[in-house]
Structure formats: C-alpha cells, structure tokens
C-alpha cells in the first residue's frame, strides 16, 4: 500500500471518529435551568437565567450560539433569549451559562404580579443551541415554589 493511501485512510478514519464523537455528544448533552434572578434597575430590568449544560462524554466542546423564547406559565411570553459568543463545555462536567435577558418594564411587572398572585409559577425556555456546529433543540421547565 502506498504512503498516499495510508495517509488518506488515516485522515478518513480521523474524520469518521471526530464525527462519531460529535454525534455521541449531541445525543447525550442535557440542558437544565439552574437558577433565575432579577437584576438591573427599575427602568432597565434584567432577568439572569442560568442554564446548566451537562456534558457526560469524554469530548470537550464549545457552545457558540443559543436562541430561545422564555415563557411564564406556558403561554405568557416574557422575552427572547440570545447568546452569541463562545464558551467551552468541559468533558464529564456541567458548565453554567448565565444569560442576561432584558424584558420590557411592563412585561417584568406583569410577570412579578402573576407570580405573586398565584404564589407559584412555571418558566419555560424553548429554543436551540449550536454546539460545535450541531443544532441541538431543547425545551426546559423551571418551577417556582
């Protein structure tokens, strides 16, 4: 076998192995809302939503994009959620991605009012994340007690 064929076979094998690792990661990664808090001022309110990205594989990977919508009690849209940047997700660990969400003042007041009246609430986050070029959809729920 010639050297060119051996090198080509090695490159092809490495590409298949890399693709398998990324596919394996995409099947096993999990998302979880680990916390919600309110920050900012009266006329510049912000919701800090912390998302836990659990990577149970041996693959180190990077999230580069996240787009989603945040809802209260399933149907009241609070805000659009965006993350454009790069954050490494270590192998066999959980990485927390804090997201700063800027709803309108009226939306925030309505959200707080609904939570105070009902004394409980449910936040839903629906969207997708781009991790190492793979688009991974998610739907998360966080119950207030």
Image (tube, rainbow, N blue to C red):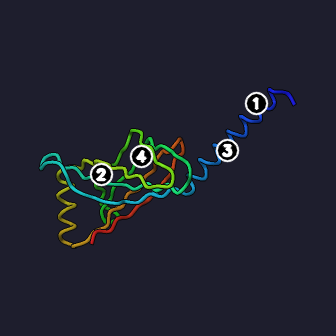
Which of the two discs, 3 and 4, labels the residue nearer the N terminus? 3
The residue closer to the viewer here, 98 or 125, is: 98
Counting from the top left corner in percent of width and height, residue 95 is at 41, 52
Query: What whole-number distance in Å separates the C-alpha atoms at marks 1 and 3?
Result: 15 Å
Q: Upstream in the sequence, badge 2 or badge 4? A: 4
Tell me the residue that label 4 is attached to: 66
Upstream in sequence: badge 2 or badge 3: 3
Q: Classify 130 as above or below 108.
A: above
Q: CA distance from mark 2 to mark 4?
A: 14 Å
Q: Is residue 1 above or below residue 87?
A: above
The mark found on residue 17 in the picture is 3
- 3 and 4 marks in contact (CB < 8 Å): no
| Mark linked to residue 76 | none
Q: Secondary structure at mark 3?
A: helix
The number of numbered discs placed on residues in the rendered structure image is: 4
Which one is closest to the eye, mark 2 or mark 4? 4
- Quadrant position of the C terminus in the picture: bottom left
**Residue on which the image places disc 1:** 7
Q: Nearer the viewer, mark 2 or mark 3?
A: 3
Badge 1: few (under 14), some or many (20 or more) residues near its Cα, within 10 Å?
Answer: few
Element assignment for label 2: strand
């Amino acid at each position: 076998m010639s050297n060119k064929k051996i090198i080509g076979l090695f490159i092809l094998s490495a590409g298949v192995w890399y693709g398998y690792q990324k596919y394996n990661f995409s099947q096993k990664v999990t998302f979880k809302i680990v916390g919600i808090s309110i920050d900012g001022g009266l006329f510049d309110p912000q919701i800090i939503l912390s998302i836990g990205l659990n990577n149970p594989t041996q693959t180190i990977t990077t999230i580069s994009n996240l787009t989603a919508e945040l809802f209260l009690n399933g149907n009241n849209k609070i805000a659009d959620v965006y993350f454009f940047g790069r954050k490494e997700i270590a192998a066999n660990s959980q990485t927390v991605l804090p997201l700063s969400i800027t709803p309108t003042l009226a939306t925030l007041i309505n959200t707080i009012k609904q939570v105070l009246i009902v004394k409980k609430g449910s936040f839903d986050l629906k969207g997708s994340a781009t991790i190492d070029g793979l688009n991974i959809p998610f739907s998360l729920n966080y119950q207030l007690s």
